[in-house]
Image (spheres, rainbow, N blue to C red):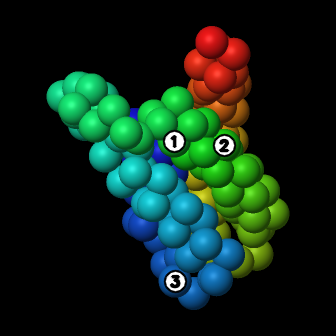
Amino acid sequence: VLGLLVWTLIAGTEYFLYPAFGWVMFVAVFYWVLTVFFLIIYMTMTYTRIPQVPWTAVGLCFNGSAFILYLIAAIVDASSVTKELDSHNYNSWAASSFFAFVVTSCYAGNTYFSFISWRSRTLQ
């Protein structure tokens, strides 16, 4: 839900005039789609039907890459928000920046828990 907020707040503006917001949109939409995809896989328990895939490692790689790229996108988003660019887009861009950092912290926590799960699987 928070990732959806990030890209809808930016998509409602003239973000295409500023390349930095294009990067934030790419990261937000890409990881939102992948998160929904993995949510469906886990909700339908499809992962139990494909035991050849190391799901704990996949989860760790996914969450780790999401954390790193979202952190970069959040920093780019925050540094691109200025009052001089366009005043009627300012509030949306500022809110998207805030939520990008919230999503980053969620992915950071998820990366930590994925690491613990991955580590417990490799120690067995």
| Vertical arrangement, residue 118 with respect to residue 9, above or below | above
Residue situated in front as seen by the camera: 108 or 54: 54
Would residue 112 be found to the left or right of residue 12 on screen?
Answer: right
Left or right, 5 with reference to 109: left
Q: Which residue is mark 2?
A: 64
Instruction: Please name whichever residue, 74 or 69, is drawn nearer the observer in this view of the structure.
Output: 69
Q: Label 3 is placed on what type of residue?
A: Phe
In the rendered structure, which amino acid carries the disc numbered 2? Gly
- Give the structural element (helix, strand or loop) at label 3: helix
- Location of residue 107 by image quarter: top right
**Vertical arrangement, residue 116 with respect to residue 103, above or below:** above
* Location of residue 85 with respect to 120 vertically, above or below: below
> What's the CA distance linking mark 2 and mark 1?
10 Å
Mark 2 Cα shell of 10 Å, populated few (<14), some (14-19), many (≥20): many
Disc number lying in front (2 or 3): 2
Gap in angstroms between the C-alphas marked 3 and 1? 32 Å
Kind of residue indicated by mark 1? Val
Q: Are marks 2 and 1 in contact (CB under 8 Å)?
A: no
> Could you say where residue 36 lies in the image, as x and y percent from the top left?
32, 43
For disc 1, the marked residue is: 58
Q: Which residue is mark 3?
A: 16
Spatial distance from mark 2 to mark 3, Cα to Cα? 28 Å
Q: Position of residue 31 (x, y in %)?
A: 48, 53
Between 77 and 109, the residue placed more toward the observer is 109
Disc number lying in front (3 or 1):
1
For marks 2 and 1, the one nearer the N-term is 1
Up the image or down, 123 lies above or below 35; here it is above
Residue 35 picture location, percent across and down: 40, 43
